[in-house]
Image (cartoon, grey):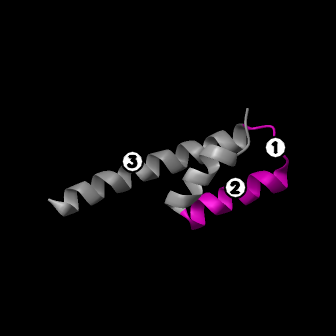
């Protein structure tokens, strides 16, 4: 049962990270800021996504 839950959580995390990266690329932030956020999300998938939710570039 742990494998299925872990796999499902991993899939949700992957979807959330892809969504965060797409929203970051579409934002009006500078190129350097976009690169910073994308690298943060890729290196620290869970914590990077949480930080992006609260402090990431908007619209």
Between discs 2 and 3, the one toward the N terminus: 3
User: Farthest residue toward the top?
Assistant: 59
Q: Mark 2–mark 1 contact, CB under 8 Å?
A: yes
| Mark-to-mark CA distance, 2 and 3 | 19 Å
Question: Which region is colored magenta?
Answer: 27-44
Between discs 2 and 1, the one toward the N terminus: 1
* Mark 2 Cα shell of 10 Å, populated few (<14), some (14-19), many (≥20): many
Between discs 3 and 1, the one toward the N terminus: 3
Residue 23 is drawn in which quadrant? top right
Residue at point 75% right, 51% down? 34
Residue 29 is drawn in which quadrant? top right
Mark carried by residue 29: 1
Which quadrant does the N terminus fall into? Answer: bottom left
Mark carried by residue 12: 3
Residue 3 is drawn in which quadrant? bottom left
Residue 26 position (above or below residue 8) = above
Residue pointed to by mark 2: 37
Measured as percent of width and height from the top left, residue 47 is found at 54, 60
For the residue labelled by badge 2, is the local secondary structure a helix, a strand or a loop? helix
């Amino acid at each position: 049962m742990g494998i299925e839950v872990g796999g499902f959580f991993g899939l949700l995390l992957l979807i959330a990270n892809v969504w965060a990266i797409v929203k970051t690329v579409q934002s009006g932030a500078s190129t350097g800021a976009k690169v910073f956020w994308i690298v943060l999300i890729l290196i620290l998938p869970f914590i990077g996504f949480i930080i992006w939710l609260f402090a990431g570039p908007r619209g």
